[in-house]
């Protein structure tokens, strides 16, 4: 497994994992939170990481880049007929 990116929080991590899985890419979420140290590692290293297999890494990177750059008009769930 290879680190793909560091999400800002758990919600972003779950959305990105879902986007990747929609494209057939297995992704793991690894949080740096440790209750014993009350989040000390998260303040030093960030919230956590999303990991994918090395064989899927390039495709996953492209998918996430496209997802981040998508404007609201390009989102697949937007109703094209009503433009809403």
Image: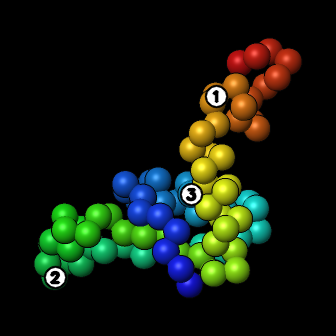
Please name which of the two marks, 2 or 1, marks the residue nearer to the observer.
1
Q: Position of residue 84 (x, y in %)?
A: 71, 18
Identify the image quadrant of residue 36.
bottom left
Q: Nearer the viewer, residue 53 or 11?
A: 53
- Residues at badges 3 and 1 in contact (C-beta under 8 Å)? no
Query: Marks 2 and 1, Cα distance to the nearest angstrom?
Result: 41 Å
Whether residue 19 is visible, yes or no, is no
Q: Which residue is mark 1?
A: 72
Residue for point 76% across, 38% down: 76
Furthest-top residue in this view:
82
Residue for point 31% across, 74% down: 32
Q: Secondary structure at mark 3?
A: helix
Using a 10 Å C-alpha cutoff, classify the residue at mark 3 as few (fewer than 14 neighbours), some (14 to 19) or many (20 or more): many
Q: Secondary structure at mark 2?
A: helix
Which of marks 1 and 3 precedes in the sequence? 3
In the rendered view, would you say 53 is above or below 45? Answer: below
Query: Marks 3 and 1, Cα distance to the nearest angstrom?
Result: 17 Å
Identify the image quadrant of residue 34.
bottom left
Q: Which mark is residue 36?
A: 2
Q: Position of residue 83 (x, y in %)?
A: 76, 16
Residue for point 60% across, 39% down: 69
Q: Position of residue 33 (x, y in %)?
A: 27, 73
């Amino acid at each position: 497994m290879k680190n793909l990116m560091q999400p800002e929080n758990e919600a972003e991590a779950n959305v990105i994992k879902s986007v990747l899985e929609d494209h057939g890419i297995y992704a793991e979420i690894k949080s740096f939170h440790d209750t014993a140290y009350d989040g000390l590692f998260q303040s030093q290293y960030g919230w956590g990481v999303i990991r994918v297999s090395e064989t899927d890494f390039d495709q996953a990177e492209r998918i996430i880049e496209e997802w981040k750059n998508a404007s609201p008009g390009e989102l697949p769930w937007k109703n094209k007929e009503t433009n809403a």
